[in-house]
Image (tube, rainbow, N blue to C red):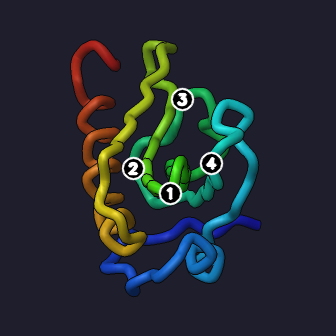
Amino acid sequence: MNQLSKVSNPEPLSSPDALLADGWREYPDQFKRYARCFYKRFDSPTRCHGNDDKAGMQLKISFSAHEGRESLELELCGGLKDETWLTILNHGLPRTVDEVTALIPRMLAIWEAANQSPEAK
């Protein structure tokens, strides 16, 4: 059973594999075959409308490398109450996992703000 994670100051993580030790799960993404993708659910007052049977919100961290350059992306995708979908993608991120995971509260705040707008109700 998946347990939801509380957002806190995460311990510094030194590599993508360290995410596994922090409770993230690695799964392939059919649209990002070039990347290693890790997923984890976090506490959030508002659930995804399309997956409201699951508590919290799932975030994804993608690691990719091309011609010796590495990049990280942080993504949240969820259904709003008006039955539209929102993808929040943060890229051009710092190069360390601990700096990227520190951005998770901001992603969840954006999700909550999108759900509070009059258009989302």
Residue for badge 3: 49
Residue for badge 1: 68
Quarter of the figure with the C terminus:
top left
Q: Residues within 10 Å of mark 1 (few under 14, many from 20)?
A: few
Q: Residues within 10 Å of mark 4 (few under 14, many from 20)?
A: some
Separation of disc 2 and disc 4 at Cα?
Answer: 30 Å
Quarter of the figure with the N terminus:
bottom right
Where residue 113 appears, as percent x and y from the top left, is 24, 36
Which residue appears at 47% of the width and 14% of the height? 84
- The part of the image, by quadrant, that contains residue 63 is bottom right
Separation of disc 4 and disc 1 at Cα?
Answer: 14 Å
Three-letter code, disc 3: His
Which residue appears at 28% of the width and 13% of the height? 119
Q: Secondary structure at mark 1?
A: loop
Separation of disc 2 and disc 3 at Cα?
Answer: 12 Å
Q: Which mark is residue 45?
A: 2
Which residue appears at 39% of the width and 37% of the height? 89
Q: Secondary structure at mark 4?
A: strand
Indicate which disc, 3 or 1, sits on the residue closer to the N terminus: 3
Q: Which mark is residue 26?
A: none
Q: Secondary structure at mark 2?
A: loop
Indicate which disc, 2 or 1, sits on the residue closer to the N terminus: 2
Q: Residues within 10 Å of mark 2 (few under 14, many from 20)?
A: few
Where residue 91 appears, as percent x and y from the top left, is 35, 43
